[in-house]
Amino acid sequence: MFKKFSPILISFILTLLLYGQDGNHTPPKFDPLRDPFNDLKETVSLAQKSDKRIILDVGGEWCIWCKRIDKFMQEEKEISQLLDKHFIMLKVNYSKENKNEKFLSAYPEIEGYPHFFVLDKNGKLLHSQNTGELEKDKYYDKDKFVEFLKKWK
């Protein structure tokens, strides 16, 4: 039975299992054990196939604002739709366990967390976004966030 499966079909099935049915790649949490070089390589491949840009979401499980931004992006329907349609998100861990210094040294300095880097579908840096600029009071501002996503889609 397995001899009938083509390598392309097997690859497609593995991709769905690894990245979810929507093709949007991101580990559910910031994981200090993940290899961001390998994750980015896989994400670039998916971005090229889907013609989407990439957002590197840099932060950690220790970061309350990282959790707030995740919740915000999931709850706000317009933002969730823009992300699904135009971007692939990739979480990159930054924590005392693993600062991913070698990986992050290729990008501009980060002032605070979470931080977004927008990349084109080939992995080239387009923009460095301080997410503090997207905040309002003790949460995030929908209008600022939508403007950011529309600008970089």
Image (tube, rainbow, N blue to C red):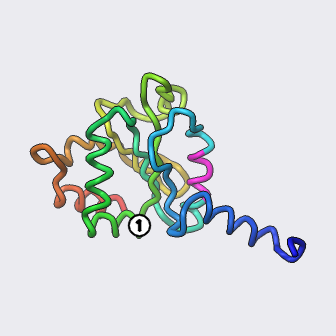
Q: Which residue is mark 1?
A: 84
Instruction: Tell me which corner region of the image, top left, top right, bottom left or bottom right, holds residue 153.
Output: bottom left
Q: Secondary structure at mark 1?
A: helix
Above or below 127: residue 45? below
Q: Is residue 101 magenta?
A: no
| Residue at image coords 50%, 38% | 31
For residue 65, side relative to residue 83 (left or right): left
Q: Main secondary structure of the magenta part?
A: helix
Spot occupied by residue 111 in the image (x, y as percentages of width and height): 29, 30
**Which amino acid is tagged 1?**
Asp
Total count of labels: 1
Above or below 92: residue 144? below
For residue 148, side relative to residue 2 (left or right): left
Q: Extreme front residue here? A: 1
Q: Extreme left residue here? A: 137
Spot occupied by residue 53 in the image (x, y as percentages of width and height): 46, 59
| Residue at image coords 37%, 29% | 109
Spot occupied by residue 90 in the image (x, y as percentages of width and height): 47, 49
| Residue at image coords 17%, 46% | 135
Q: Is residue 42 magenta?
A: yes
Of residues 72 and 90, the one drawn nearer to the viewer in this rendering = 72
| Badge 1: residue crowd in 10 Å (few <14, some 14–19, many ≥20) | some
Above or below 100: residue 56? below
| Residue at image coords 26%, 69% | 78
Magenta residues (range): 39-45
Of residues 33 and 91, the one drawn nearer to the viewer in this rendering = 33
Above or below 29: residue 11? below
Spot occupied by residue 76 in the image (x, y as percentages of width and height): 25, 64
Image quadrant holding the N terminus, namely: bottom right
For residue 81, side relative to residue 50 (left or right): left
